Image: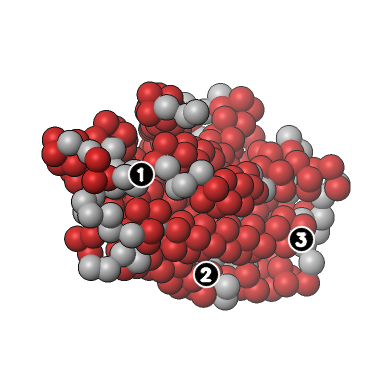
Amino acid sequence: MLTDTTALIVTYIVYAVCTILIIVRLYATWARSRQWKGDDYWMILALAILTTRAVSTTLVLEYKTSNVDHPERLPPEEVRRRVFGSKLVILTRTCYAVFIWAMKFCVLSFYSRLVEQLRHYQRFIYPIWWLLVATFTGSILSTYLECRPFNHYWQVVPDPGHKCTYSEGQLYTTGACNLFTDMVLLGFIMPIIWQLNLPLRTKLHIASLFSLGIIVMIITIIRLPFVVGNQALQQWRTMFANGEVLASCIVANAPVLYRIIKDRRQYGLRGSSSMTPSTTPHLQNPYRSEFFFSANRSPIQIRRGEFAASGDSIEFVARVLSDCDVDVEKVGYHREFSDTRETIRA
């Protein structure tokens, strides 16, 4: 049987790994461009929420919850402890939802910069933003409204009922919203990757990195029936939540960290100041640069032939993931990218 100690150790390990990933991402991004972008600020929020969740989870596992058989047999002191622990469960579940959706917002913010100059895909960004807002709201509402009256969430004696102790509605609602949004995000980026006129092996390589979200989906699918089948015990809820937290953090950080690692391997970058034409020959001609479609530039900058070294473009992602020298003339975009190329040539 899973013990509180085991669940707590796993919680600390997940917290440490996620914290390292986020800090490394933030440091490397700042060292590279001396600025943070929208997706990086989502990570800062996530780090604060992750810390809060680690503390609250520790207390919940120590003080227990109202999910117990025959609560009337408990001594008064144990009842008081479980009342306190049950109150913190609400905070823990809120932190879980905020962290998971912060990772989704981070991923979508990254995608929005990738497609800033690709009008065919840009039109989908705002609907997905609103979808994430709606699903996050649904998850939070299911957390706070399933048990009525609200103070029955932390009532131990008498037994407050199945809805308040098991909270299956919150589990299924959050799980369904989590699963659906992961599918939408995955379905959005895959067509963009397949638009690249690159070898199939290269496309599969790139797609595999952006498909890590499937891991989160698998954990969610396994979690729902397993936790319910084990009486929704807090230990199992914590363990599976830890798995989703870790997987979602890896998914959200993998493309950015991999891109930075590849940059440093290929060009020995120590920061944005080293990204000059003399140190990186591929930047000498902007018309043959993988940075030319940078998502951080305006249409005016494109017409002027300017480019940014931050390079969050589809060509850049393709190059750093495939080890191939992608340039504008060889990428061979399909028809929806022709307008941007004509603007460049003008």
Of badges 2 and 3, nearer the viewer stands 2
- Residue behind mark 2: 128
Front-lying residue, 231 or 227: 231
Front-lying residue, 77 or 216: 77
Task: Give the mark nearer the N terminus: 2 vs 3.
Answer: 2
Q: Residue 305's image quarter?
A: bottom right
Task: Identify the residue at image location x=61%, y=31%.
Answer: 262
Please name the amino acid that badge 1 sits on.
Answer: Asp
Measured as percent of width and height from the top left, residue 253 is found at 51, 41
Of badges 2 and 1, nearer the viewer stands 1
Measured as percent of width and height from the top left, residue 333 is found at 77, 62
Please name the amino acid that badge 2 sits on.
Answer: Ile
Measured as percent of width and height from the top left, residue 80 is found at 15, 41
Task: Give the mark nearer the N terminus: 2 vs 1.
Answer: 1
Does the rendering let one see residue 65? Answer: yes
User: Dot 2 surroundings within 10 Å: few (below 14), some, or many (20 or more)?
Assistant: some
- Residue behind mark 3: 195
Q: Which mark is residue 69?
A: 1
- Tag 1–tag 3 contact (CB < 8 Å): no
Q: CA distance from mark 2 to mark 3?
A: 20 Å
